[in-house]
Image (spheres, helix red, strand yellow):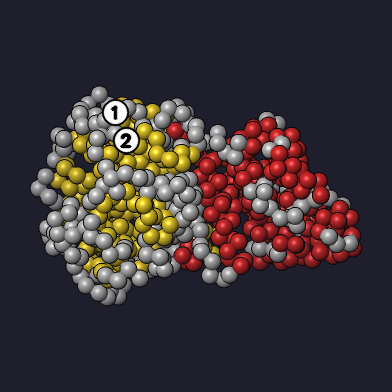
Amino acid sequence: MTNDDIALLREYARNNSEAAFAALVSRHVNLVYSVALRQVRDAHLAEEITQAVFIILARKADKLGDQTILPGWLCRTARYASANALTIQRRRQHREQEAYMQSQLESQENPTAETWNQIAPLLDGAMEGLGQKDHDALVLRFFENKTFAEVGATLGASEDAAKMRVNRALEKLRKIFTKRGVSSTTAIIAGTISTNSVQAAPVALAKSVTAVAIAKGAAASGSTLTLIKGALKIMAWTKAKTAILTGTVIILAAITTVTVMSHFRNAPPAQTGRLKLPTGNVTPMIGYGYSHDVIILASDGSLWSWGEERLGWPVLGLTNIHNTVSLRRIGNETDWVSIAVGDSQNLAIKSDGSLWAWGENLYYQLGDGTKITRPTPVSSIPGNDWKQAATGSRSLAIKNDGTLWAWGANGAGALGIGSITPQIATNSVQVGTSSNWTKILGGGIQTVGLQSDGSLWFWGSPDGHGRGKNNFLVPTRVSPDTNWIDVCFGYFTTFALKSDGTLWTWGLKADIYNGGPDNGLDGSLAQITPQQIGTESDWKSFSSSQGCFYLILRKNDDSLWALDASEHRTIKSPNAYKPITPRKINFQKDIAAYAAGGDNIGIILTRDGEVWTWGNVLGEHSQKDFWSNGKPAYPKSKTIEKPWQVSNIASPD
């Protein structure tokens, strides 16, 4: 970075100087905003990405080396945050592509505009493919409009050397563009980038960015924290990739893989080991996680996992195994009694009432008082009176006395403590004063719970992504009824079950199931009042997972049924979707536990210890399969429609 940049950053890091940081923001906010805007094509989202980038800068101010080129670092960080945001906003991509094609048609009479419209969608990906020095040279010359002498001084080279490096980097860009169907000269590319690459950020953005970033994100929204989290993961992965070829792959949290279900006639993966889990007297449980992992509590009190760690965090709890097509045992204990499976971390309770956790720990959500990632279960919040736990961007747990406690990230007020501050709770805090909680469920920045009188409560973000209004900062009753018996999350949807056997839903995408109005993407019409799905009144239990379109239900006669809404992964006109109706699942064995996940995945544990599954095959993809050319990848999974049996291997590793 320039001497002035480093001086300002060091002044901020050492003395917490708001003036120094404000000067850096003012100097570079247009650059960051332009990179974000060019990639996401959404001014509001670009502002949020800009906010996230400067929060990351504030957090890393004392860690950046003296040789860092700050404009280049900011460009790369903005691309990481934008990649995260683009994946989260994947449903907008279709409309963005249409808008781009329209702009192509409108710019035929203007060669400069046409060239920019052609290279703009490719520019940041091409820049990412350059070496760091070439990348930084182009940023300084064309994004920051530095002279060759200034570029050379910043890079520690002569003016002539800087000119040669810029010209070589331009030629590399030209070749990349040519391979992608855009033919032009280096002179036109240089002029086009210089003219169009940086747009003025909104006037008020620099001020708001400075205020929130100086507080290290304490007042940031839940969606901004999600962008920060995802960008930090990509940065960590990129750094590891540079150092070693087999670095840990980090992929974005709170993202739904776009997989169009193909009914392949595939054979199950080769299975070794036993075909039955040990049995006993513990109530068995199955949890499906957003990382494509499955955690099973067997009835003998042992803990098992199977699947993948696509988000890069060690959710399988197996230390050195990061994907497995067979169940593997977690440790050797047989005193587990409850589990809670989340996006990137998991919780479990032992028979002595102690709480344990493993996986990602960026926001103290494991409850061990650190931010250290844990590959195997470690002791969580102290105590021997824990009864049931839940996890999302934060963790929650109910004690034997019916009180509720929470810790971790507080995006959108998901901790339920009446405020969005503290943004992160490093220790457990009590949620309200009630002592009759019976079930708690955490999904992203939403929380839902049941109390012993059958009442239903909700807090956090009503739309699920944090951009809607009127977040609930304390547990809020969403229905006057007192016959609620179960709850679960789906894709931006909450499902609830009544004792009379009726099924209900609310949330951003509740219209998919209840036929209400389309709530759109901004959450402004997100439903917060339960509405009934169908007319059936003989449901007794159900299962789904956050971000999933697949819901499995069980009737009073013990038959299993599926509600499959995966068609809604594809954007269509409202009338083009098929009605969602329950479909019976043909499975005749005695079911002890079951779970649903993804768009088609079902898992069943029978009373004699057999584990059966169908849908996308889990465990065949390693972490490197979820990352390609510096970007998230979405490998296609094999699909097996009929249930097949999963084996288990007792040795943890």
Q: Amino acid at mark 1?
A: Ser
Identity of the residue furthest to the left in this view: 557
Camera-side residue of 68 and 192? 68
Residue 188 spot, x, y in % from top left = 79, 56
Which is more toward the observer, 577 or 339?
A: 339
Question: What residue is drawn where x is 79% and y is 66%?
Answer: 168
When the figure is inspected, residue 647 is found, relative to residue 78, above or below; the finding is below
User: Residue 434 bears which disc, if any?
Assistant: 1
Q: Are marks 1 and 2 in contact (CB under 8 Å)?
A: yes
Q: Which residue is mark 2?
A: 404
Label 2: few (<14), some (14–19) or many (≥20) C-alpha neighbours in 10 Å? many
The answer, for residue 611, to whether it is visible in the render is: yes
The residue drawn where x is 58% and y is 64% is 240
Local SS, label 2 = strand
- Secondary structure of the residue carrying numbered label 1: loop
Figure quadrant of residue 273: bottom left
Identify the residue at horizontal 30%, vertical 71% (top origin). Answer: 651
